Amino acid sequence: MAMEGESREASEKIIAAAVAQHSWTITTTDNNGMTTALDLSSFMLQYVPPSIFALNSIVNLDLSNNNLQLVTEELSNLVNLVVLDVHSNRLTSLPHSIGKLAKLKHLNVSSNLLSSLPHTIEDCTELQELRADFNELERLPETMGFELIYLRVLCVSSNKISFLPSSLSHMTSLRLLDIHLNKLRMLPQDIGNLTNLEKLNVSSNFNTLSALPESIGNLSSLRELDLSYNQIIVLPDSFGCLEKLQQLKLEGNPLLVPPPKIVEEGTEAVKQFMAERWHIKIPPSNRNGNRPRHHKNLLNRLTKGKWGMKWAGEHGNGNANNNTLLMDDYNYRSLQEEEGDELRAPRSPFRQFLSPRR
């Protein structure tokens, strides 16, 4: 206890000395001179001085690159906090009171020793960015996706996560999802609901991730996808519908479908190959996202069972032309028969493509 008291006193002295020397950054933005931003990074602090929690006007608090082992429940006093950065410390837990930070939008807890995140984090309903890379996380709060609907960035790489919560599919504002270097076994079946997702990194889950859900084809905004260094053998046929995909990394997988030769030809070759497995011809002139009107909402058409149909031009007059889309069950079954048991295509998308939205 004496050592703990000495460490706390030392932290207070560091703060006092820093203030005296003006070596920390205090930014005041209001007419009353109230402190709104406080930078205490790289001060070798072991404790957060209690006096900090009396500054309830703080909007931005940076405590990164210290030796903090604990942030007390008094954190909830900072009711105006929007940005909290505690990366590169020695934290083993976060206070449950963090859920009372109703205005918090950016939280960085990377490079600590966290084994879990408090379930109360879902009460930070304004959160837009959560970075928790390089920790000891084994799971994420199961229901966090139901409340964090404004989250745009979720980075939890270099942890020990095996499963993502199914509620993740409700985070429809997500633009970036980074879960590489974990122990991930599968992605949520409804991940296709994340139609605003632009970048997905699930690389280097090594011996655990071996398959992807069919719904991945509904990630209509996806531009970058890193699947490298996993155990994926077959890409789902819906992969051919990722028309905005520009960067695809597949190295380090025992892929059979698509075959290595196609993978070597690049992203567009993979997309075309997978599209042809569905017998959906994507005109070369429209591979940059400029789809003709009858290609739009294609996945929605597919999930409604409109098979064996022909779209010929914008008005659907039934006359075959170069833009005719042929989608019949016979052609899908023939792909399975041609490849045999070893390379059998995934379950027919006519039966199940996407899980329904909640």
Image: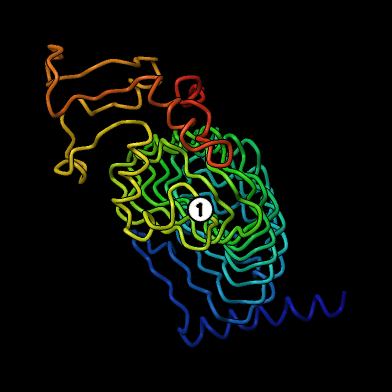
Give the x, y percent position of residue 334: 43, 27
At horizontal 56% and vertical 70% (from top left) the residue drawn is 63
Compared to residue 150, the image places residue 206 above or below, namely: below
- Count residues near mark 1 (Cα–Cα under 10 Å), then give few for <14, some for 14-19, many for 20+: some
Give the x, y percent position of residue 288: 20, 46
Give the x, y percent position of residue 61: 50, 64
Q: In this view, does 325 lie to the left or right of 253?
A: left
Residue 105 appears in the rendering: yes
Secondary element under disc 1, as helix, strand or loop, is loop
Q: Which amino acid does label 1 sit on?
A: Leu
Name the residue beneath numbered marker 1. Answer: 255
Residue 149 appears in the rendering: no
**Residue 305 found in image quarter:** top left
**Residue 59 found in image quarter:** bottom left
Task: Name the quarter where the N terminus is drawn.
Answer: bottom right
Q: Nearer the viewer, residue 239 or 310?
A: 310
At horizontal 38% and vertical 57% (from top left) the residue drawn is 261
